[in-house]
Amino acid sequence: MATVLFDKTILIDNSVIFTLNNEWQQEDIADLAQQIFERLINYIVIETNEGADCLNIRFQYQNIIFILQFDVSSQSCWLECEAISDSKALMNMLTKMKQGIENK
């Protein structure tokens, strides 16, 4: 795998969209997820569901359930809250993730 880095992270509606700087494949998803999770402290993975060209990871962070999704065919990676009512927590998480990027 060529090194894939997150180029931009933006909030659109109730989702955080991650833009990557290179094309990636299904076998790269574990490394990509790790790049995201290493920016968070005290998260708990609840479940992982893998499809033919996609993967989603449900996890808990600060008592809120989030879903990290990867879709290989569209080269998409995004994060959303399980409950729309928790969307403010998504903004807080994005802020903390960006601080983590800046502190590296």
Image (cartoon, helix red, strand yellow):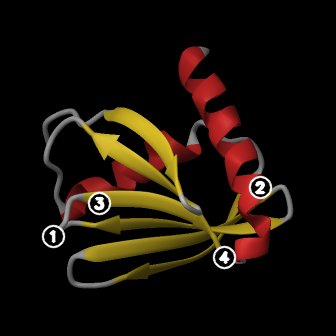
The x, y position of residue 39, in whole percent, is 60, 36
Q: Secondary structure at mark 2?
A: helix
Q: Give neighbour class at mark 2: few <14, some 14-19, many 20+ (Cα, 10 Å).
A: few
At label 3, which amino acid type do we have?
Answer: Ser
**Can residue 64 be seen in the rendering of this structure?**
yes
Q: Residues within 10 Å of mark 1 (few under 14, many from 20)?
A: few
Q: Which residue is mark 4?
A: 82
Question: Residue flagged by tag 4: what amino acid is it?
Answer: Glu
CA separation in Å, label 1 and label 2: 30 Å
Marks 4 and 1 close (CB-CB < 8 Å): no
Q: CA distance from mark 2 to mark 3?
A: 22 Å
Q: Closer to the N terminus: mark 4 or mark 1?
A: 1
For label 2, the residue is 88
| Secondary structure found at label 1 | loop
Q: Looking at the rendering, which quadrant does residue 46 occupy?
A: bottom right
Q: Residues within 10 Å of mark 4 (few under 14, many from 20)?
A: some
Left or right of 46? Residue 12 is left
Amino acid type, callout 2 = Lys
Q: Which residue is mark 3?
A: 76
Q: Name which of mark 1 and mark 2 comes first in the sequence.
A: 1
Give the vertical position of 39 relative to 50 (above or below).
Answer: above
Alpha-carbon span between mark 3 and mark 1: 8 Å
Q: Residue furthest top?
A: 103
Vertical order, 100 against 81 (above or below): above
Q: CA distance from mark 2 to mark 4?
A: 12 Å
State the residue at coordinates (40%, 47%).
18
Q: Residue placed at 86% from the left, 64% from the top?
A: 63
> Which tag is nearer the camera, tag 2 or tag 3?
2
